[in-house]
Image (cartoon, rainbow, N blue to C red):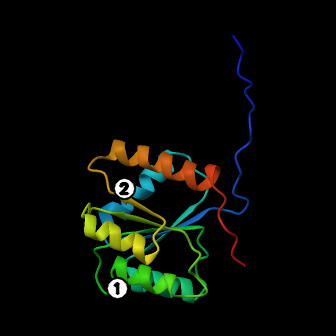
């Protein structure tokens, strides 16, 4: 029997400080996301926007330079789909990776999000334990498995 050769290949490491812009109107959800992030001892910073319009202003004013954006759909003023369409139409921000993070598992909404340029779509979990598991997977994927683009 031939033994397999096992090589360890280092995963690419994100080389600038991780900043995640979370666009979420629900205060309780924002708090739970922050607690789960803190408990995971992840490196990086979470920045919160209350809705798409608030997030757009943060981006346009240069107040945040996110590595990744988590985006809810159901929000006042500028909802997640409208914001997604706006950001993916913007030459300045269209390469920004966007993970939809919402309660909707509606197939039409999922399809629409991907058609508008979302990079991922995650349905919010119903309990904190599952939220921490999702954070582990999201953090690992976006910081260790793939290479995020630099923005100047």
- Disc 1: CA contacts within 10 A as few (<14), some (14-19) or many (>=20): some
Q: Please name which of the two marks, 1 or 2, marks the residue nearer to the observer.
A: 1
Decide if residue 26 is in sight here. no
Q: Identify which residue is drawn at 62% across, 50% down.
A: 145
Residue 25 x, y percent position in the rendering:
33, 73
Q: Identify which residue is drawn at 43% across, 50% down.
A: 36
Q: Identify which residue is drawn at 56% across, 80% down.
A: 94
Q: Quadrant of residue 22?
A: bottom left
- Disc 2: CA contacts within 10 A as few (<14), some (14-19) or many (>=20): some
Secondary structure under the numbered disc 2 in the rendered image: helix
Q: Which residue is mark 1?
A: 78
Q: Are marks 1 and 2 in contact (CB under 8 Å)?
A: no
Mark 1 and mark 2: Cα distance apart in space? 23 Å
Is the residue 86 above or below the residue 122 in the image?
Answer: below
Decide if residue 22 is in sight here. yes
Q: Which residue is mark 2?
A: 32
Residue found farthest to the front: 1
> Which of the two residues, 4 or 128, is positioned nearer the viewer here?
4
> Which of the two residues, 40 or 79, is positioned nearer the viewer here?
79
Answer left or right for 76 relative to 88.
left
Answer left or right for 100 relative to 103.
right
Residue 44 x, y percent position in the rendering:
60, 58
Of callouts 1 and 2, the N-terminal one: 2
Is the residue 19 above or below the residue 138 in the image?
Answer: below
Q: In which quadrant is the C terminus drawn?
A: bottom right
Q: In which quadrant is the N terminus drawn?
A: top right
Q: Identify which residue is drawn at 43% across, 83% down.
A: 85
């Amino acid at each position: 029997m031939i033994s397999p050769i096992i090589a360890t290949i280092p995963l690419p490491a994100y080389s600038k400080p991780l900043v995640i812009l979370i666009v979420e109107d629900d205060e309780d959800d924002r708090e739970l996301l922050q607690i789960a992030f803190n408990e995971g001892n992840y490196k990086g910073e979470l920045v919160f926007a209350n809705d798409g319009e608030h997030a757009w202003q943060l981006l346009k004013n240069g107040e945040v330079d996110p590595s990744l954006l988590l985006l809810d759909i159901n929000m006042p003023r500028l909802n997640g789909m409208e914001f997604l369409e706006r950001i993916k139409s913007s030459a300045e921000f269209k390469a920004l990776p966007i993970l939809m993070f919402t309660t909707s598992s509606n197939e039409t909404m999922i399809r629409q999000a991907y058609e508008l340029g979302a990079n991922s779509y995650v349905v919010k979990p119903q309990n904190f334990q599952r939220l921490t598991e999702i954070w582990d997977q999201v953090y690992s994927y976006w910081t260790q498995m793939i290479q995020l683009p630099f923005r100047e």
